[in-house]
Amino acid sequence: MIENKRIEFDNVIEGESYRSCTFSFSKNTLRISDVIFDNCLFDQADFSNSEWLDCELKRCDFSNNHFENSVFYRTKIKHCNLVGADFSNNLWKDTTISESRADYINFSGSKLTKCRIENSSLIEAYFQEVVFNGGLNTNDCDFNKSNFWNSKLKKVNLANSNFEVLDVNPTDLKGLIINQYQAVKIVQLFGVTVE
């Protein structure tokens, strides 16, 4: 465990844990594997084209950061600030977001395979043209006003999460898993009155 150090991002050691460290800007494309970042700060806000394999990101602030065209495999993101973070055109597999604030997060154009989001706020999140391979499991999340336009929602499970309004295309709803109260909200989106 390395603690309370300022480290060049290019010198991150595979298999190491970092707590309360600050990482300097890297000019290279990031390839991070089997690393734990706990309560760390990052000088850079652009992580585009990066790879994160078997990592844990805990208590980090990635608000409004850029992760376009990145890859996340078997990575856990917990207690992080992801407000406004751009994960568009990403490839995620077996990755979990938990206990995080991710309002306005953008996954548009991404491919998510066997991913999970739990105990997190994703108000007005963007999931436009996302491919959900194996669905998406959610638990105790707030998806109010999130946009799922042009994303096939088969096996996307929102039944144990919350929303008042979703921006969806009716033809993409087939296979969406919701509870009976959410069904009324979905029907009302299309001008149907439920008595």
Image (cartoon, helix red, strand yellow):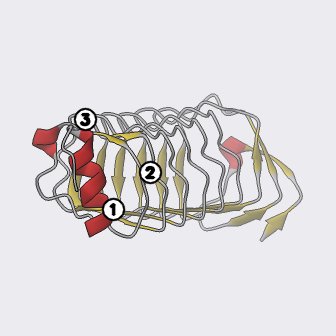
The residues bearing labels 2 and 3 have C-alpha atoms spaced at a distance of 17 Å
Query: Would you name the residue on which mark 1 appears?
Result: 158
Q: Left of 39 or right of it: where is 144?
A: left
Query: Would you name the residue on which mark 3 appears?
Result: 129
Q: Left of 129 or right of it: where is 143?
A: right
Q: Crowding at label 1, few (<14), some or many (≥20) Cα neighbours within 10 Å?
A: many
Q: Earlier in the sequence, mark 1 or mark 2?
A: 2
Q: Crowding at label 3, few (<14), some or many (≥20) Cα neighbours within 10 Å?
A: some
Q: Earlier in the sequence, mark 2 or mark 3?
A: 3
Residue 143 disc label: 2
* Contact flag, marks 1 and 2 (Cβ < 8 Å): yes
- Which of 64/17 is in front? 64
Looking at the rendered structure, the kind of residue marked 2 is Phe
Estimate the x, y position of residue 82 in percent, counting from the top left. Answer: 60, 45
Estimate the x, y position of residue 120 in percent, counting from the top left. Answer: 55, 59
Question: For numbered disc 1, what is the local secondary structure?
Answer: loop
* Contact flag, marks 2 and 3 (Cβ < 8 Å): no
